[in-house]
Image (cartoon, rainbow, N blue to C red):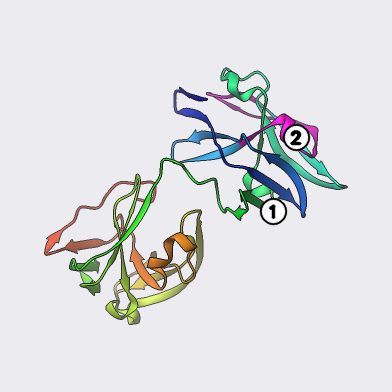
Amino acid sequence: MSDTRGRVKVETSPKRVRAYASGHLVADTRRPALVWEIPYYPTYYVPLADVRAELAAAGPGDRSPSRGDATLYDVVVDGVTVQAAATRYLDSPIPELHGLVKLHFDAMDEWLEEDEPIYVHPRDPYKRVDILASTRHVVVQVDGVTVADSHQPRILFETGLPPRYYVPLSDVRLDLLRPSDTRSHCPYKGTAAYWSVDTGGAVRDDLVWIYRSPLPESQKVAGLACFYNEKVDIILDGEPQGRPHTPFS
């Protein structure tokens, strides 16, 4: 099924999806629904019949302009209770949601698509990530100071985002980087660690990231540094690039 009402799209996935809490199976479905509650990525809704845990009503949740009034539920499985871990829209104006339960992604300890774990949120079937080796000349400047200069980038093309230029650490002014405690998680690439950039005049927080142990499909960027196009000046083959406007701007 596929439906678009405003900014909400609902689509059935052919993947088998399982969710666990404290090691106990909460749901096992071969017909999960992908629901784009926000336009950037989907979340999983599970048919009520495929939920293996008890759902105990926990009171009203927030009202969604598109999905209607939410009812929260505690998830109870094998003596373990995860509070307010599920949501139903019992009288939603989107009829496809009536028989579905949203298990809050972060409330579950583990999610599996088929037999492989997923992280952060479900992978969007309409998003593609291509990583291509290149000899294009990439220069990165922060406050007028050149922080990276490379002729051997790996360019990552991800649907809906600007190209990202991953460069070897040997092509980066490591003396200008300051370690950060920030970590981010991507369902396509894995966990990124960050640096801030100190050019002497100011410290720019979390401008640079690196995937030291990326997920298998993104191994080509392992150990390479990348900069937010939105926050630095990039010169590509001698031509200054504009700063794109994205959710990371």
Q: Position of residue 234 (x, y in %)?
A: 22, 62
The correct choice, above or below, for 181 with respect to 97 in the image is: below
> Which residue is situated farthest in the left direction here?
238
Q: Which residue is mark 2?
A: 73
Q: Amino acid at mark 2?
A: Tyr
* Camera sees residue 205: no
Of discs 1 and 2, which sits in the foreground? 1
Please state which of residues 95 and 179 is positioned toward the viewer in this rendering.
95
Residue 68 occupies quadrant = top right
Please state which of residues 228 and 133 is positioned toward the viewer in this rendering.
133
Crowd tier of the residue under label 2, counting other residues whose Cα lies within 10 Å: few below 14, some 14–19, many 20 or above = many
Mark 2: which secondary structure?
Answer: strand
Q: Position of residue 93 (x, y in %)?
A: 57, 17
Q: Which residues are magenta?
A: 45-69
Q: Position of residue 196 (x, y in %)?
A: 39, 70
Q: Which residue is mark 1?
A: 109
Q: Residue at x 61, y 25 (%)?
A: 97
The correct choice, above or below, for 12 with respect to 204 in the image is: above
Residue 98 occupies quadrant = top right
Return the disc, 1 or 2, that comes first in the chain's sequence.
2
